[in-house]
Image (cartoon, rainbow, N blue to C red):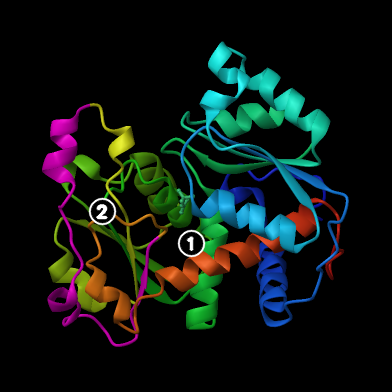
């Protein structure tokens, strides 16, 4: 049962619980009126200490489509954290006004800290370069929708794998599915942290490869997960400028890819996918962003106890 639970990192829910969320999200997508009023009278606090378009707006859209309401801030400069209020106190306040909290924060571990002070469920909307579990639910739902199942495939992650929290969360989650092979494509400076590769993948005996060249592996991939170089997490601008265009996916590079490839990206995109790729039938990143709203609807009704799922 998900009612009253926090979602801090991708391992917090069992595979069965995630399956039920995916099935619910699919039903919501297929029947637009389903659960329309299920969160009437409920309030969701959106505490965004970092910029966001998709995560914040899709949570807001999800709550409004379920008949509930939202409050919060998109700019921490307009909150009392700018006056020095601690995260613990901000979260205590939000929990006394709202039924659940969605929080994005630049500090790794902030969502876990928030969950210790909140009397209502906390959903991690991204904590620094650490995790982004609702993006992972979005990514898994997209893979399930476009490939009919999750597992038995090769996924390539490309770009900033050091700071890209969506890759950390997705790799950790996919390690729980059968026969997933992973290819990590990055410059040496932006390699995936060892707590993911040695700490999880090696331990779980997941087949993986690290390489610097997209061209040499693109033909083996069933899914390609492109990522932005995370400027905001660099210590100096020179390194960012040197690395920002390490990979640009364009039409010539895609000639070597399979027809069945799905191209994913958590977005926002900067220069790593050329605009010409948007028209390629393999580009799935805008669909992926839309699935994010349906999975967040499923998550909210479940966490708020507004719907009971079979098996709950
Ligand atoms: N994918 C994602 O987290 O996008 P935003 O930063 O726009 O929320």
Mark 1 and mark 2: span between their CA atoms?
Answer: 18 Å
Foreground tag (1 vs 2): 2
Residue sitting at x 25%, y 64%: 273
Say which quarter of the image contains residue 98.
top right
Q: Is residue 134 above or below residue 156?
A: above
Element at label 2: loop
Q: Residues within 10 Å of mark 1 (few under 14, many from 20)?
A: many
Q: Which mark is residue 1?
A: none
Locate residue 98 relative to residue 153 in the image: left or right. Answer: right
Residue sitting at x 52%, y 24%: 77
Say which quarter of the image contains residue 210.
bottom left
Q: Report if the beta carbon of the residue with label 1 is closer than 8 angstroms to ligand 1.
A: no
Q: Picture coordinates of residue 275 (x, y %)?
A: 25, 69
Is 243 magenta? The answer is yes
Identify which residue, 71 or 86, lies in the foreground: 71
Identify which residue, 9 or 252, lies in the foreground: 252
Identify which residue, 105 or 177, lies in the foreground: 105
Locate residue 229 relative to residue 178 in the image: left or right. Answer: left
Q: Which residue in the structure is indicated by mark 2? A: 159
Given contact means CB atoms under 8 Å apart, are the residues at marks 1 and 2 in contact?
Answer: no
Q: Residues within 10 Å of mark 2 (few under 14, many from 20)?
A: many
Q: Picture coordinates of residue 281 (x, y %)?
A: 34, 84
Quadrant holding the C terminus? bottom right
Part of the protein shown in magenta: 236-265
Element at label 1: helix
Q: Which residue in the structure is indicated by mark 1? A: 174
Residue farthest along the bottom direction in this orientation: 259
Q: Picture coordinates of residue 91 (x, y %)?
A: 69, 27
- How many tags in the picture? 2
């Amino acid at each position: 049962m998900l009612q009253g639970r926090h979602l801090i990192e991708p391992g917090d829910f069992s595979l069965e619980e995630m399956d039920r969320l995916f099935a619910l999200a699919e039903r919501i997508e297929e029947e637009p009126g389903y659960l329309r009023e299920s969160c009437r009278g409920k309030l969701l606090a959106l505490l965004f200490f970092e910029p966001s378009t998709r995560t914040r707006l899709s949570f807001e859209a999800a709550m409004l489509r379920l008949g509930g309401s939202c409050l919060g801030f998109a700019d921490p400069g307009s909150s009392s954290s700018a006056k020095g209020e601690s995260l613990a106190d901000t979260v205590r306040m939000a929990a006394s006004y709202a039924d659940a909290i969605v929080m994005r924060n630049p500090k790794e571990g902030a969502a876990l800290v928030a969950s210790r002070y909140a009397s209502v469920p906390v959903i991690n909307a991204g904590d620094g370069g650490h995790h982004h579990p609702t993006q992972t639910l979005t990514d898994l739902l997209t893979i399930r929708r476009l490939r009919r199942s999750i597992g038995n495939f090769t996924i390539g992650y490309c770009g900033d794998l050091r700071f890209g929290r969506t890759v950390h969360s997705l790799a950790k989650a996919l390690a729980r599915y059968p026969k997933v092979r992973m290819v990590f494509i990055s410059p040496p400076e932006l390699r995936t942290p060892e707590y993911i590769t040695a700490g999880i993948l090696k331990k779980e005996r997941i087949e993986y490869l690290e390489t610097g060249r997209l061209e040499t592996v693109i033909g083996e991939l069933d899914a390609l997960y492109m990522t932005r170089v995370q400027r905001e997490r660099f210590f100096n601008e020179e390194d960012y400028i040197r690395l920002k265009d390490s990979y640009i996916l364009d039409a010539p590079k895609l000639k070597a890819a399979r027809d069945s490839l799905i191209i994913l990206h958590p977005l926002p995109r900067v220069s790593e996918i050329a605009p010409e790729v948007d028209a390629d039938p393999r580009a799935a990143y805008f669909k992926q962003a839309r699935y994010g709203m349906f999975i967040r609807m499923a998550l909210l009704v479940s966490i708020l106890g507004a719907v009971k799922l079979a098996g709950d």
